[in-house]
Amino acid sequence: MRKWGFRHRGGDARKTPPINNRIMTMTDAVQGEKYRIVRIDGGYRLNSRLCAMGFIPGEIFYVSGASRGGPLCVVVKGTKFAIGRGMAERIQIREI
Amino acid sequence: MMIGKEITIALSGNPNSGKTTIFNNLTGLRQHVGNYPGVTVEKKTGETKYKGYKVNVVDLPGTYSLTAYSLEEIVARNFIVNEKPDVVVDIVDSSNLERNLYLAVQLMELNTPLILAFNMTDIVKKSGKKIDISLLSELFGIPIVETVGSRGLGSDKLLEAVIKVVSSRKEKKVEVKYGEEVENEIVKIISVLKKEKIPTFEFDVRWIAVKLLEQDRDIIDTLKKTSGPKYSKVEEVTAGAIGHITSILRDTPEIIIADGRYGFINGALREAYEEASLKKVDISEKIDRVLTNRIMGIPIFALIIWLMFQFVFTLGKYPMGWIELGFGKLSVLITEIVPQGLIRSLLVDGVIGGVGGVIIFTPNIILLFFAIALLEDSGYMARAAFVMDRIMHKIGLHGKSFIPMIIGFGCTVPAYMGSRILENRRDRLVTMHINTFMSCGARLPVYILFAGAFFPAIAGNVIFSIYLIGVVMAVIMARVLRATRFKGESEPFVMELPAYRIPTLKGILIHTWERTWMYIKKAGTVILAISILMWMLFTFPMVGNNYSQDYKGKVNEIEQSYQSGEITERELDESIAVIEAKMAGERLAYSAAGRMGRFLEPVFRPLGFDWKMVVATISGIAAKEVVVSTMGTLYSIQEADGQSDSLKTALYKHYHPLVGYNFMLFTLLYFPCMAGMVIFRKEAGTKEMLFQIGYTFLLAWAISFLVFQIGRLFI
């Protein structure tokens, strides 16, 4: 796995750290760590859109950056996306 | 030899797959930009010749899939289904096969003649990966051609493959299977579609069934509309199928189906591709750590925008000066050739004044679109949106909206055109509708004149307050428009941050040229017509011999006193200029515009405006800086500009400072100018343009009304 000097958390820093293998949302992801997508709760339109971009249950991704309170930078299937927090909250993930 | 055979190919592909570069390589400058009928999605077409064929090339919008998620996707899909291009060429970024082939699989499912162009194969080779093209081609049942768009390689091979597909039509090939559960439901839906004799148009019936499972709104609405009550049976079966799949597979059908497509792709890649795993994002990652840094991101963005602003307006000043000089010379030339009278006035004041005033912005347009193309093609634009998204989101806009808003401080016309960088129609329209409040350069002379006349000691602060009010109004109106006319959940924010690339000069130049040419064409047609109309309003009816005083007699008197040596030559010139300015004032008062001013005066009375201010406002429709010269004419001041002291004195004598400030406010708030409106219409349609005119005018009136009525209580 890729090492990053500091472990920024993509999400809200006040939240307690995730326990291993627990299901959480994408905003809880620690920057640079790899996770697996478990579920997407977006409604059929958003689901189709996210799937077309490669956000699909079972897929591995990592968060490469985030702007404070703004969107996250997520790398999935070799491409980097900016994804809004509202949307990231609807994507459930699990550590691998 | 075959002659006159015409074929149409459609280019499809993911955003950032290099589709536009391939399109440019194929067609060169033989391009035409328009819109798809009824929507604002841009349609680019071009043509080329190959082996006796005339090949029309249509550049479809870049999409990730063919669902009905966005307008672009529906447009791309409908074009393929309705227009039936002879071949669809899907441009695939071969350094990112799995993701790009997702669209290819959907095109396959549409059962359209298809070729895959594996673009950027050089990058793949450099990284040491291997793709077994012939095996992949066999597994997909689709011809595959290798291209390197950035170096112009592979275009001939691509056209060769197109001709081959056209001359040997193959029937349906490989089919993607979605697993037993889903397949069973597909069969059920197909049978009910057939039993109820639901028209499936040009679509493949299996494809319709899959789309129904994916709950594709566009398809559902079309079927509902065309088959009426018969559709309820289909709806019932579909709902049952969706429920069944969801309960057994614990995921909704659209996810299962997407999974099936990726499964198919990965199956093929496992055999034909050396590595199909998570790709490293390397150099781009390093650049991103700086450009999208939590702390540095926004300052860097601000710096880049500042540089762009300087580039567009500071550098643009020089060619603008030359153009102005050119038109000035032209005016002089016409004045010399054409005898005094209506025709000269039409040419000099109407045509050159109007069209020239618009052409003069061309250098700005060229530089702006050059800068935008540079930012877009290099990949920075997406980062800018990322960095600004949080702030802009708060006022209901998109991160990218910031760029046209900044440009609006220079000139609203390129700002409207620059709003194109926003893909979402709602974001684009709101951004355009509030752009007029970003006080443009042409309004500045008006502020300088009025602030100088009424608040000479604090003119700078007064002008700044107007700019600030503009920004505040933009923020307020963005929220208001979002909550009313452009309601609805704001588009969820997902956007690709493509790998940084060095843009090609050719691509940037083509892009810049397209926009510029569109602008010049408008200046020559619509704006010419409006300029002539405005000229007529300000010229007719003519006073003829009905001046209130015998000006001609006065001129003769003065000339006589000059000849008898009573006054100097300078005094003569000055006195004649004063008389001529008075005559011009009277002519203007007598003209249709002057009459309109008087007629509309009651409407503006509650704002404290008199008819002269109304006439100036009307003239400001042509261009805001014209307000100053109109005021000058009305107050019979020759050579009026923002610095004119005699005009300032005249204004100070006639109006209360409150009215002066109010007039500045009004000038800020009502829509920018006719050139702006023409471009607005071109970009957003007649309805939106009328809305823009109507709402900014009402808003300007309402705000000025409040300021005057409340302010009056204190004076």
Image (tube, coloured by chain):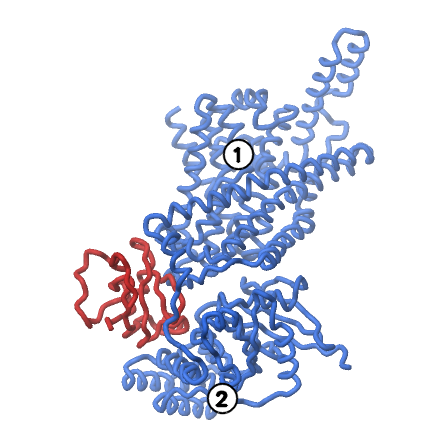
Chain in red?
A: A
Q: Amino acid at mark 2?
A: Val
Residue A15 location, quadrant: bottom left
Q: Residue at x 73, y 33 (%)?
A: B542
Chain ID for label 1?
B
Query: Depth-wise, is mark 1 or mark 2 nearer the camera?
Result: 2
* Residue at the disc numbered 2: B174
* Residue at the disc numbered 1: B444
Is the same chain shared between marks 1 and 2?
Answer: yes
Chain ID for label 2?
B
Separation of residues labelled 1 and 2 (CA atoms): 65 Å
Q: Is residue B572 left or right of residue B91?
A: right
Q: Crowding at label 2, few (<14), some or many (≥20) Cα neighbours within 10 Å?
A: some
- Residue B328 lies, with reference to residue B694, above or below; the image says above
* Residue B231 visible in the current orientation: no
Q: Amino acid at mark 1?
A: Leu
- Who is closer to the viewer here, B44 or B485? B44
Q: Residue at x 31, y 63 (%)?
A: A63
- Who is closer to the viewer here, B365 or B528? B365
- Residue B112 lies, with reference to residue B284, above or below; the image says below
Task: Give the mark, 1 or 2, whose residue is nearer the N terminus.
Answer: 2
Chain B, chosen colour in render: blue
